[in-house]
Image: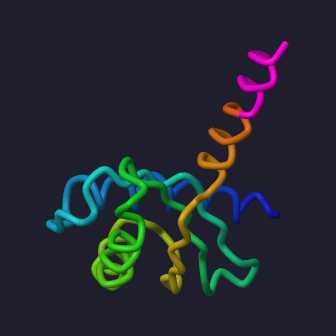
């Protein structure tokens, strides 16, 4: 990954997080954390990874994020110095869930000893 891609990824995480917290007025997007962003090498699209506090609301949150993506892209265009705005694909980040399951299994193993 190039330095430019890394810089854009970092900016996307920071700016999308701010926009979701301060400017999007949708209750389904409350308690969303943007965990990562991966922009393609041609800068035409980006995968935005997110988590939610209540895992039972991840599908509702995903739909709300997808419907707000146009608004988010418009706000990003004003804030970031890039020529084209990316097409976003929002993806639920399952790494935290995976980490919790792994931690639970380690605890179970230690308790059996």
From the viewer's perspective, is 60 left or right of 38?
left
Camera-nearest residue between 102 and 21: 102
Kindly indicate the quadrant of the structure image that contains residue 77. bottom left
Camera-nearest residue between 51 and 71: 51
Q: Residue at x 40, y 61 (%)?
A: 16
From the viewer's perspective, is 104 left or right of 73?
right
Camera-nearest residue between 25 and 109: 109
User: Looking at the picture, does residue 50 appear above or below residue 77?
Assistant: above
Query: Can residue 83 be seen in this snapshot?
Result: no
Q: Residue at x 85, y 12 (%)?
A: 113
Q: Is residue 28 found inside the magenta-colored segment of the image?
A: no
Give the dominant element type of the magenta stretch: helix, strand or loop.
helix
Query: Can residue 64 be seen in this snapshot?
Result: yes
Q: Residue furthest top?
A: 113
Residue 90 position in % (x across, y down): 50, 74
User: Looking at the picture, does residue 82 appear above or below residue 42?
Assistant: above
Look at the image and name its color scheme: rainbow
Q: Residue at x 71, y 23 (%)?
A: 107
Camera-nearest residue between 47 and 91: 91
From the viewer's perspective, is 112 left or right of 87?
right
User: Which quadrant is home to the N terminus?
Assistant: bottom right
Q: Is residue 111 found inside the magenta-colored segment of the image?
A: yes
Magenta residues span: 105-113
Residue 112 position in % (x across, y down): 80, 18
């Amino acid at each position: 990954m190039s330095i430019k891609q890394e810089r854009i990824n970092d900016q996307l995480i920071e700016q999308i997080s701010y926009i979701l917290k301060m400017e999007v007025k949708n209750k389904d997007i409350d308690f969303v954390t943007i965990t990562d962003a991966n922009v393609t090498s041609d800068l035409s699209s980006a995968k935005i990874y997110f988590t939610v506090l209540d895992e039972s609301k991840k599908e509702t949150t995903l739909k709300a994020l997808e419907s707000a993506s146009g608004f988010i892209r418009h706000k990003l265009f004003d804030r970031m110095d890039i020529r084209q705005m990316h097409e976003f694909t929002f993806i639920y980040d399952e790494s935290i869930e995976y980490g919790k399951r792994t931690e639970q299994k380690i605890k179970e193993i230690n308790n059996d000893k």
